[in-house]
Amino acid sequence: MQKGAFYTGVYRNAFAEAGYAGIEIENRIDEIFNALFYGGEDERIYHPAGADMGYIEDTGNHDVRTEGMSYGMMMCVQMNRKEEFDRLWKWARTYMYLEEGDNAGYFAWSCRTDGTKNASGAAPDGEEFFAMALFFAAHRFGNGEGIFDYEREAQNLLHTCIHKGEAGTAGRAMWDPENKLIRFVAELDFSDPSYHLPHFYELFGRWAKEEDRAFFMEAAAASRAYLKKACHPVTGLCAEYADFDGTPHVQENAKERHDWFYSDAYRTAANIALDYAWFAADEWEVEEAGRLQGFFCGHPEPDAWEGIFAVDGTRIDGKALHPVALLATCAQAGLITEGENAERCIRKLWETPLRTGARRYYDNCLYFFAFLALSGNYRIY
């Protein structure tokens, strides 16, 4: 059985396999990072704040989210950019960290750009990315003091995420203690398939506090099993929100539908690809990536990239809010697949520029992660 990069130290460069030159690939990655962090006002999503902080703006909602801040930190540690990493982490720790209430120890999922909290609740996808980026920073940059003791901060955060609510303490854990599945938010008992990062949990199972490691190893196995239930066996599509049995979660009287294949759900394919690339734990992941690429690359409607779909492939009226993000994650699935569909997706991504304008934040984050992954530069540190 194939072994993943965690065991071999070898990271596939799918762009090189498609014929792109090494220097061309590296230059493109540098260009994307510089555009996101230091480009023009219609490109950048990063903003320095004061002498030693900075934030990532959700340009569509004009706020700062734990999703974006933790994504920015992951980008920086992968690119060996310690100054920007520390600026983002200090901003998050200063303004987003919750000191009191049921969610104390978590991070407020949304703040204004001046640091004022918009919410007292937390979104688990931010916490898990914070923890992973911090571990990588500990190993790549070395631990510092206070909040820059990255490893201690990551371990404490993960400990809170799985133990909150025990022994009568306030709040709830971000992972269900019985089924080991990550919740959409701590207060609700359903999940979001795109939150499931078994490749992160495998590493948490080695680097978290010793008493927490077994839990995260079980969570990795639980998430891999869950994704098989959440992803449609023919189309490969999954819903944005799904119940613990994997079925699309329908919210009664909700203003928006989240039981369709829509924005959040795009990340699932990218996560599955990275899990297999790092750990190669389940051949189903290769099959799933191929199904998703086949659905879009083989779709009879050329504008399928801009569509909204039910998980069975039925097209829904309306247009996707983040078509570049969808393309990016389909291309990233090519990290673990081969053949015409994989190459077509990879080439389509290469030929597609960064998105500009108000909705660029989410698309371009996933775009950059896809470029890192497909070039062999999204690595374990």
Image (tube, grey):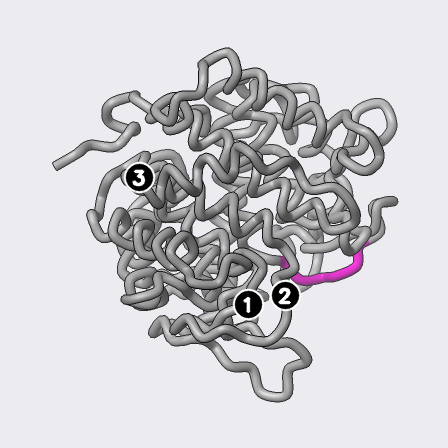
Q: In the rendered structure, which amino acid carries the disc numbered 1?
A: Ile
In this rendering, position of residue 40 left or right of residue 222: right
Magenta stretch?
Answer: 117-122
Provide the residue designation for mark 2: 319
Q: Is residue 128 magenta?
A: no
Residue 316 in the image: state x and y as whole percent.
54, 75
Q: Position of residue 334 (x, y in %)?
A: 37, 40
Of residue 22 and residue 268, the one placed in the foreground of this image is 22
Decide if residue 209 is in sight here.
no
Q: Quadrant of the C terminus?
A: top left
Q: Are marks 3 and 2 in contact (CB under 8 Å)?
A: no
| Discs 1, 3 touching: Cβ within 8 Å | no
Q: Amino acid at mark 2?
A: Lys
Q: Quadrant of residue 342?
A: top left
Of discs 3 and 2, which sits in the foreground?
2
Residue at image mark 1: 308
Vertical arrangement, residue 16 with respect to residue 1, above or below = above
Whether tag 2 and tag 1 are in contact, CB under 8 A, the answer is yes
Return the residue at label 3: 336
Q: Is residue 138 left or right of residue 199?
A: right
